[in-house]
Image (cartoon, rainbow, N blue to C red):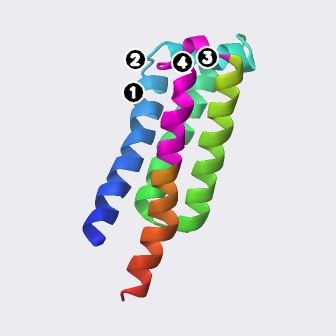
């Protein structure tokens, strides 16, 4: 159980780091800023994209810290759900897999739920 926990912690944090640092802060994936621009406006899209990237890196740190894991999981699920629904409706043409992105978001949400609630409970009760 502890090994699965570590693997999932690393995986979840890695998703936030890749999307926050590489895609948004380093702008290695320009469509991320295009999505922000279309949803929130072009005037501040660069600063907003960088800010979102920083927040995603902070989310990764929170995941790794293990502090308030359930609150962290709920926060991640809400952020991913809201973000992906907005993108599904407003910018499907800019998504890597179009509207199918919602499926990948849902799978990621299930992983986060398992990690934060089910696995956490199994580890806690086995002590």
Q: Main secondary structure of the magenta part?
A: helix
- What is the x, y in percent for residue 13? 40, 48
Name the spot of residue 74 as percent of width and height, x first. Answer: 62, 57
Of the image marks 1 and 2, the number of the one nearer the N terminus: 1
Residue 92 is left or right of residue 97, and the answer is: right
Of residue 72 and residue 115, the one placed in the foreground of this image is: 115
Q: Which mark is residue 92?
A: 3
Query: Label 1 belongs to which residue?
Result: 22
Neighbours of disc 2 within 10 Å: few (<14), some (14-19), many (20+) = few
Q: Which residue is mark 2?
A: 28
Give yes or no for contact between labels 2 and 3 (Cβ–Cβ under 8 Å): no
Residue 78: in magenta span: no
Tell me whether the residue at label 1 lies in contact with that at label 2, contact meaning CB atoms closer than 8 angstroms: yes
Tell me the quarter of the picture where residue 120 sits: bottom left
Dividing the picture into quadrants, the one containing residue 73 is bottom right
Q: Residues within 10 Å of mark 1 (few under 14, many from 20)?
A: some
């Amino acid at each position: 159980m502890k090994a699965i926990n570590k693997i999932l912690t690393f995986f979840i944090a890695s998703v936030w780091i890749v999307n926050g640092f590489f895609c948004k802060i380093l702008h290695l994936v320009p469509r991320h800023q295009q999505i922000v621009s279309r949803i929130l406006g072009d005037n501040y899209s660069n600063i907003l994209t960088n800010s979102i990237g920083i927040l995603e890196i902070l989310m990764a740190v929170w995941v790794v810290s293990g502090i308030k894991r359930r609150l962290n999981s709920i926060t991640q699920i809400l952020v991913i759900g809201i973000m992906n629904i907005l993108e599904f409706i407003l910018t499907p043409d800019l998504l890597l897999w179009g509207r199918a992105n919602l499926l990948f978001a849902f799978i990621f949400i299930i992983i986060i739920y398992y990690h934060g609630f089910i696995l956490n409970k199994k580890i806690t009760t086995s002590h």
